[in-house]
Amino acid sequence: MESELIGLRSTARGFGGMVAPPLVGLAANALGFEPVFLLVSLLSWIGLGIVAAFVTESHDPTASASGTVS
């Protein structure tokens, strides 16, 4: 299951990195830089909020570098 999630994440990053710049550029040409900048900023803050609310930290802060809990 974890390998499938890693693959999905990699696919999303690649697709987003390939599709987003041209779409944002076209939107900026059509609507102007400022409204598109505000929209993308808003979407980024919404994404940050979703991640902060639903993603749990998997790192154990009490674990030492060797992987044992002290």
Image (spheres, rainbow, N blue to C red):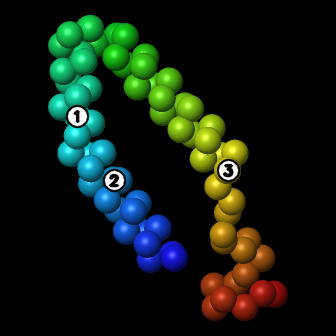
Residue 42 shown left or right of residue 11 in the figure: right
Residue 6 in percent (x, y) is at 43, 69
Residue at image position (50%, 24%) is: 42
Q: CA distance from mark 3 to mark 1?
A: 27 Å
Which amino acid lies under the numbered mark 1 shown in the image of this protein?
Pro
Residue identified by numbered label 2: 13
Vertical order, 37 against 60 (above or below): above
Residue 54 in percent (x, y) is at 67, 50
Q: Residues within 10 Å of mark 3 (few under 14, many from 20)?
A: few
Residue at image position (34%, 17%) is: 36
Disc nearest the viewer among 3 and 1: 3
Label 2, secondary structure: give it.
helix
Vertical order, 64 against 27 (above or below): below
Residue at image position (18%, 21%) is: 26
Q: CA distance from mark 2 to mark 3?
A: 19 Å
Looking at marks 2 and 3 on the same chain, the residue that comes earlier in the sequence is marked by 2
Q: Are marks 1 and 2 in contact (CB under 8 Å)?
A: no
Image quarter in which the C terminus is found: bottom right
Residue 20 in which image quadrant: top left
Residue 33 in percent (x, y) is at 28, 13
Label 1, secondary structure: give it.
helix
What numbered label is drawn on residue 21? Answer: 1
Q: Residues within 10 Å of mark 2 (few under 14, many from 20)?
A: few
Vertical order, 10 against 51 (above or below): below
Which amino acid lies under the numbered mark 2 shown in the image of this protein?
Arg
Residue identified by numbered label 3: 54
Residue 29 in which image quadrant: top left
Residue at image position (34%, 10%) is: 34
What numbered label is drawn on residue 58? Answer: none
Looking at marks 3 and 1 on the same chain, the residue that comes earlier in the sequence is marked by 1
Which amino acid lies under the numbered mark 3 shown in the image of this protein?
Phe
Looking at marks 1 and 2 on the same chain, the residue that comes earlier in the sequence is marked by 2
